[in-house]
Structure formats: structure tokens, C-alpha cells
Image: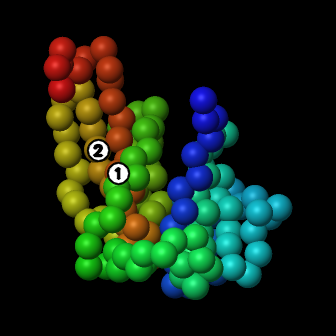
Amino acid sequence: MPSKIFVNLPVNDLPRSRAFYTGLGFTLNPKFSNEQAACIVISEHVYVMLLVKPFFQTFTHLPVADVSKATAVLNALDCASREEVKDLVARALKAGGTTPNPEQDHGFMFQHGFADPDGHQWEVFYMDEAAAPAQF
């Protein structure tokens, strides 16, 4: 079974994107970073590869989506508490991100999210699985 996930994101301005993600408290893995790419470590098993658009394009024959006009994917990160969700979104705003949607409280789950400077959306949530309905 696969043991890690690498989310590859096309970016317009690599230094700006690198600063955004490290501003969230994530770390840069310099071993897999250069002028075309930055490897951001989200957790032990989750990485974000920020790739300048021309380099990203070498991995696909399809056009690169303009995420300022359409949602291509929603990435979701779980947090240990509601406070952690709020803190991460606040750090995203401070680092230059936006919040495309208001926070939502479903009782057993609290969620909010942010978009990075290129418009890639991240849903951030806390869920109390024991309090979740039998069928969701």
C-alpha cells in the first residue's frame, strides 16, 4: 500500500508560495526543492510539491487549470481541535491567503478553510468521530 501522498500544485510565483506555506508553520524539504519546485512537509506522510507552471505542465498533457476561475480539487486537513482549525486559518490569512467560505459548525464536525495565493483551496476541519451520526 502507498505510504505517502504528494499533492502537486502549479504556482505562479514560487518564492511567494514557499513563503505562504512556511508561514503556516509547515517546513521546506530543501533536498527536493530548487528554482522550479519546493517540497513542503505538511506531516510525516503528507507533502505538497509547489511546481512553477511550466514545470508542472511537463507532468501532464492536459491544460493546467486556472483555479482562480474553477475549483479543481479540495484538499482537506484534519486538526486536533476547533482551536487548531481557527489558528491555521488565521495563519493562512496572515500569510496572504483568503477564506473562500465561512466556517461551519455541524456539531460533531467544525470546518473552515483557506485558499493559497494561487487559489488552491484547503478545507481544515476537526471531527469528533464518536459524536458523528451513524450515517453521514
How many residues crowd mark 1 within 10 Å: few (<14), some (14–19), many (20+)?
A: many
Quadrant for the N terminus in the image: top right
Residue 86: tell me if it is visible: no
For label 1, the residue is 123
Q: Amino acid at mark 1?
A: Glu
For label 2, the residue is 111
Residue drawn at point x = 18 percent, y = 15 percent: 134
Q: Nearer the viewer, residue 128 or 75?
A: 75
Q: Nearer the viewer, mark 2 or mark 1?
A: 1
Residue drawn at point x = 48 percent, y = 75 percent: 61
Cα–Cα span, label 2 and label 1: 7 Å
Q: Nearer the viewer, residue 123 or 108?
A: 123
Pinpoint residue 37: horizontal percent, then vertical percent: 68, 73
Pinpoint residue 82: horizontal percent, then vertical percent: 36, 38
Q: Secondary structure at mark 2?
A: strand
Q: Secondary structure at mark 1?
A: strand
Q: Quadrant of residue 108?
A: top left
Q: In this picture, is 81 found above or below 74?
A: above
